[in-house]
Image (spheres, grey):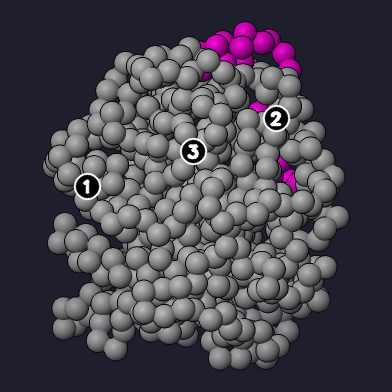
Amino acid sequence: MYEHDVIVVGGGGAGLRAAIAAQEEGADVAIVTKLHPVRSHTGAAEGGINAALREGDDWELHAYDTMKGSDYLGDAPAIETLAQDAPEEVFQIEHWGMPFSREEDGRVSQRPFGGLSFPRTTYAGAETGHHLLHTMYEQVVKRGIQVYDEWYVMNLAVTDEETPEDRSCHGIVGYDVQSGEIAGFKANDGVILATGGPGQAFDHTTNAVACTGDGYAMAYRAGVPMEDMEFVQFHPTTLPSTGVLISEGVRGEGGILYNADGERFMFEHGYANNDGELASRDVVSRAELTEVNEGRGFEDEYVMLDMRHLGEERIVDRLENILHLAEDFEGVDGLKEPMPVKPGQHYEMGGIETDENGHTCIDGLYAAGETACVSVHGANRLGGNALPELIVFGARAGKHAAGGDMAEAKIETGERGDIEYDETELPYQPGEVGIDSGPSGVAADGGAVTADADAVVEQTVETERERVSTLMERDEGVQHSQIRADLQKTMTQNVNVFREEEGLKQALQDIREIREAYQDVYVDDPSRTFNTDLQQTIETRNLIDVAETITLGALVRTEFRGAHWRAEHQERKDEKWLKHTLVGWNDGDPTIFYRPTILEGENKTYEPKERSY
Ligand SMILES: Cc1cc2nc3c(=O)[nH]c(=O)nc-3n(C[C@H](O)[C@H](O)[C@H](O)COP(=O)(O)OP(=O)(O)OC[C@H]3O[C@@H](n4cnc5c(N)ncnc54)[C@H](O)[C@@H]3O)c2cc1C
């Protein structure tokens, strides 16, 4: 068994920042990650990092824009923490060597981004995430933080008291992709999940194949509620054939959208009379799909994004990477032609419920980055607000896990405090089916309750070894690829930008059938080493759990807020719905409950207003 004070699962932006912060508190830290850190999906981030750095801007404006962007579903303590801490975090990474783009006078450049009242998006060309990862990885190497890369984390070692709020996390179980070894990692002070998003639940996504929602599913089955999962961001400018992202930076620099009738529809059809192309992402995505659905799209599928008028010099200086992406993935020369774009799944606003210190309701278990929901983004994330979230809340989670001195959190977690239970009658039973091809989580598999942390980790290792044996011993059944394709198909058809009750019910039924099919999943590849078939089979099960929480939330939330559009419910219903949706695994029999949104900030209460751009 390996042993460290703090174990960070994931080496993306959130994981690296968390590990550095924990190390600064004197902890012995390890990062366990299925990809080498610099291959993490943060590397794909193009546009930039929001932080109020300049005269004329301040954290309160940033907080206000974020709250408005969230459609008043973000929690003020989280949003204000983000806005207050982001400048210092940006200075910190700048001091670590982040090569930000600069103005002639030497100041770090900032560009406008959708939904921002001030141009506060700091960037490094159109490769901000790539440079962020490399800058922080250098710090990790310099500090001697141990990195176990190509280790796939299969489960959390959590005790199994009846209520999650009484449980503790003592470590993880990892699978060494290179050797096939399955081993326990004991964490003396805490485990931080920084495992990124779940984009692979959809078939048209900007997310990499590694974005399989592992952290959500592991935390969920251990008893941590999933918060606001129905709020999925569909980015308006993805390349139609691959889902590859064309950064909002293009519109930030002045790029325009037009339809097949040559109209600049964001203005000409009144979707956003003030901000046009730079309205919030949910607004632009719906506008594009409306254009296509009403027959004004190209090939019934997409609209055009044009940046030619910006001129070669500016494009090459600030958006060079976009030229390569358009050329390589769509065969389009962005200097000479407009680029075809359509909405694609991009970001999960919801996630593992945490407080402002990254702590979940399970003692010793933390989450940060896209996989967490603190909640900063509420019903809609503003572009450029994910990267500051990684560094601000990554740092806080790392510091707290390592025992650093921090103020008590204002945000409550778990099934306690001011909560109410949902009473919607569901058309299909969510949750566990049969044996689910192995243990469904430490809590449900019984027998791990013990005061001895080593025993909890060892027992979890044993259950995971059994699970792998079961999967490997079968010589026939269904392959994960078929199951995953069915899941992606129903999610893309029924739980997309526009949602209808019948479609959501259909998705729940499909997910039920997909879970049943998963009972017969088998691993074709018998090898011990680099067995991606085995890894993807486990990932697919995680995607099923994540997809179900998204669909459940989408069905029970009978209003239109932010990215969540419902055909039958065309308005935001503040009286009933200023609250977070929480889905608890409940040992395989999910419960849905709600907690009020916190609108009281440090100096003011945010009054929900109509959101127009
Ligand atoms: C194309 C694109 C462009 C974007 N541009 C911007 C932008 O300009 N500005 C902005 O603010 N946001 C942007 N975003 C959003 C932002 O980049 C992501 O939300 C963020 O980078 C996620 O970081 P993370 O650290 O949470 O996860 P990731 O960077 O995805 O890292 C996850 C880590 O977890 C590891 N991992 C996952 N599962 C396991 C497991 N089971 N076992 C072990 N390790 C595991 C992976 O190996 C990886 O190291 C963009 C997103 C995309 C997709």
**Residue type highlighted by circle 1:** Gly
Instruction: Write down the quadrant of residue 494 in the picture.
Output: bottom right
Asked if residue 233 shows in the view, the reply is: no
Q: Which secondary structure is most common in the magenta stretch?
A: helix
Mark seen at residue 404: 1
For image coordinates 27% across by 23% down, the residue present is: 3
Percent position (x, y) of residue 62? 38, 77
Question: From which residue to which does the magenta span run?
Answer: 464-490
The amino acid type of the residue labelled 2 equals Glu
Q: What residue would you read off at disc 3? A: 165
Looking at the image, is 496 positioned above or below residue 107? above
Q: Amino acid at mark 3?
A: Glu
Along the polypeptide, which appears first: circle 3 or circle 2? 3
The image quarter containing residue 26 is top left
Location of mark 2 (residue): 432
Name the mark nearer the viewer: 3 or 2: 3
